[in-house]
Each structure stands twice: as C-alpha cells, then as structure tokens.
Image (cartoon, grey):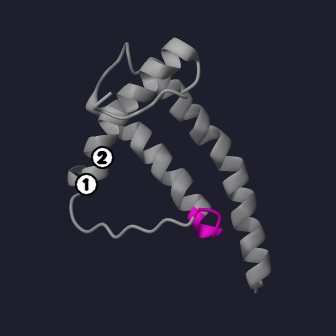
Amino acid sequence: MATHSEIQDQAYQFFIEEAPELLQLIETGLLNLQQERSTAKIHDLMRAAHSIKGGAASMKSFNFQEECIGDHDSYLWGHTAIAMATRVADSFAKYRWCPNIIGPAA
C-alpha cells in the first residue's frame, strides 16, 4: 500500500507531465481563436485551464476553491472567460504576450 508521501509524489509527477501539454493546448487555442471562433474552442480552453487549476489544487499549490452544482455550461466564469479569452488572444496577437489585459470593458 502506498504511503501519503508516495501518492503526493505520484500526483506531482503526473501534474508535471500533464501541465505542459495543457499549457500548449491553451497557447495554441488562444493563437487560433481569432481565425476559428467557436463555443467548442472556448470550452476546450476553459477545460484545459480548469484541469491545470485542479491539478495544482490537488497538490495544495493553488489555493482556490469553487462549488459548482448543476449544468457546467451555465457557470458564470465560463461566460466571462469568452470575453477574457478574446482580450488574451488580441494581446497575444499584438504583443506575443498578455501584459495589457484589462478585461471586457477595455
């Protein structure tokens, strides 16, 4: 039977292996968002970000909690993520980085 420390080490290793793939998916998705805007692409970006958040939280590396009940498509953060992703994609396209993000009212 694995000890708590061994399980934590395995979780950390899995996160280290998975995170670069998810970050690559997010980067590629943001860069392609201008050409291919679709709800499915936005959902892919949100799922990847959520997976990174969940993986980091499982190791106590990211202190964020949410309680979500019901239909995943109606979460408020999902709707605001569309506006935020648009800002991120615009900044990425213009500056190759995202230093000038203010939000949907910008």
- Compute the Cα span from label 1 to label 2: 5 Å
Q: Position of residue 87 (x, y in %)?
A: 39, 27
Residue 68, placed above or below residue 53: below
Please give the label number shown on residue 99.
Answer: none
Q: Which residue is mark 1?
A: 75
> Which of the two residues, 53 or 18, is positioned nearer the viewer here?
53
Identify the image quadrant of residue 55.
bottom right
- For disc 1, the neighbor class at 10 Å (few under 14, some 14 to 19, many from 20) is few
- For disc 2, the neighbor class at 10 Å (few under 14, some 14 to 19, many from 20) is some
Q: Which residues are magenta?
A: 57-62
Which quadrant is home to the C terminus?
Answer: top left
As helix, strand or loop, the secondary structure at mark 1 comes to loop
Q: Answer whether labels 1 and 2 touch (C-beta < 8 Å).
A: yes
Please give the label number shown on residue 78.
Answer: 2
Q: Position of residue 90 (x, y in %)?
A: 42, 19
Residue appearing at x 50%, y 14% in the figure: 93
Q: Is residue 6 magenta?
A: no
Query: Which kind of residue does numbered mark 1 sit on?
Result: Tyr
